[in-house]
Image (cartoon, rainbow, N blue to C red):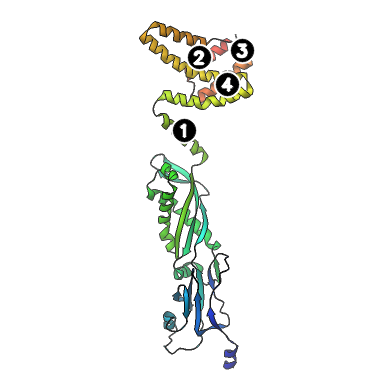
């Protein structure tokens, strides 16, 4: 009976794995009802490694190459099975193949803005995304920590875990880089290097090596981006409030000019009043210079100001619409409260 069982057994002469390109990280050679022939051949292709496992214990590890399976090439397995040098029989052992090629274009990104400390802006909420590539560097560790005894382990099963690992370490990477947000957004390569350095030991704990990482975009939420744009605009004019008013007026006038072109009278009046405020500031400066340097210049400036303020007949609905536009100019900081009140009195008088 024992002889018949021996005859029915299938013996494996060649152990190899031809990857099918489906993103499999680990694959167990099917051993059901089969034994490995002593002196058989193990073929490990480039970008692969093979591991022999005896009763759940990792034994010998093989890199790329072709090996004749004997007690000399299987020293750990020989020790675990208490073989001697003359062992010549077929044997059973689990054999796992691992793909060590790069798993490229793995996506990562922040589904929600994350809060970081920034030396320029204090607390900043930012978004970022990019991709990375990794490979199996230690198949023994990957087997014991991740893939285990499964028949195959696809890369997709690891994707969520690795993406979470990247997100968990973004804040530490930014803090370690020492870069403020503006420099961070401008130097994404440095940010990527800092993040990859932060991730390296975490990947190594499960037998992986991170090969590359890119940061494709770093941005602020829309509401914070608007605040940053205003801060940049203030930075362009510094502490010169005159220049700041010119900046604000220059920002507002095209919008009202567009309204004037589309809607006519009221929008045009509001645009004229907004531009008149900026002109009025220039006239006021000239008036002050005239008071210091001579009456003629002051009289000319006063005359110009009076001419600019000359009343014009308008309908009640136009007066109310103009007041609304003036209110918008005041809320944007283009008109002061005093200037708004003066114009309001002037327009209301026209209704009497």
- Whichever of labels 3 and 1 marks the residue nearer the N terminus, that label is 1
Q: Nearer the viewer, mark 2 or mark 3?
A: 3
- Contact between labelled residues 2 and 1, with CB atoms less than 8 Å apart: no
Question: Between marks 4 and 1, how big is the CA–CA gap?
Answer: 24 Å
Residue shown at the point (50%, 14%) measured from the top left: 342
Q: Is residue 73 shown left or right of residue 264?
A: left
Residue shown at the point (42%, 46%) measured from the top left: 187
- Whichever of labels 1 and 2 marks the residue nearer the N terminus, that label is 1
Q: Quadrant of residue 327?
A: top right
270 w.r.t. 9: above or below:
above
Question: Between marks 3 and 4, how big is the CA–CA gap?
Answer: 15 Å
For label 2, the residue is: 342
Find residue 230 and name its label: 1
Which residue is at the far left? 292
- Contact between labelled residues 3 and 2, with CB atoms less than 8 Å apart: no
Find residue 324 and name its label: 4
- Contact between labelled residues 2 and 4, with CB atoms less than 8 Å apart: no
For label 3, the residue is: 314
* Disc 2, SS: helix
* Disc 3, SS: loop
184 w.r.t. 65: above or below:
above
- Whichever of labels 4 and 1 marks the residue nearer the N terminus, that label is 1
**Nearer to the camera, 102 or 74:** 102
């Amino acid at each position: 009976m024992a002889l018949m069982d021996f005859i029915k057994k299938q013996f494996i002469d060649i152990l190899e794995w031809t990857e099918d390109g489906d993103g499999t990280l680990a694959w167990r050679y099917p051993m059901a009802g089969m034994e490995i022939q002593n002196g058989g051949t193990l073929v490990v292709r480039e970008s692969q490694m093979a591991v022999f496992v005896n009763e759940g214990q990792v034994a010998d590890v093989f890199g790329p190459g072709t090996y004749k399976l004997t007690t000399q090439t299987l020293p750990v397995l020989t020790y675990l099975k208490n073989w001697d040098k003359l062992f010549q029989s077929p044997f059973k052992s689990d054999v796992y193949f691992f793909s060590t090629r790069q798993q490229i274009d793995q996506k990562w990104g922040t589904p929600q803005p994350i809060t970081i400390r920034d030396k320029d802006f204090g607390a900043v909420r930012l978004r970022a995304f990019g991709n990375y590539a990794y490979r199996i560097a230690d198949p023994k560790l990957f087997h014991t920590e991740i893939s285990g005894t499964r028949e195959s382990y696809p890369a997709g099963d690891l994707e969520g875990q690795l993406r979470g690992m990247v997100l968990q370490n973004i804040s530490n990477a930014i803090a370690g880089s020492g870069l403020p947000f503006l420099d961070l957004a401008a130097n994404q390569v440095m940010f990527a290097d800092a993040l990859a350095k932060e991730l390296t030991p975490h990947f190594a704990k499960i037998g992986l090596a991170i090969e590359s990482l890119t940061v494709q975009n770093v941005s602020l939420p829309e509401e914070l981006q608007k605040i940053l744009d205003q801060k940049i605009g203030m930075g362009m004019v510094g502490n010169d409030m005159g220049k700041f008013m010119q900046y604000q007026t220059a920002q507002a006038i095209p919008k009202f000019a567009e309204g004037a072109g589309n809607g006519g009278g009221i929008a045009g009046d509001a645009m004229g009043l907004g531009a008149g405020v900026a002109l009025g500031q220039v006239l006021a400066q000239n008036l002050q210079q005239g008071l210091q340097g001579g009456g003629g210049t002051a009289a000319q400036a006063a005359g110009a100001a009076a001419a600019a303020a000359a009343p014009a007949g308008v309908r009640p609905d136009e007066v109310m619409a103009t007041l609304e536009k003036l209110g918008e100019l005041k809320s944007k900081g283009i008109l002061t409260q005093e200037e708004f009140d003066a114009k309001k009195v002037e327009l209301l008088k026209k209704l009497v």
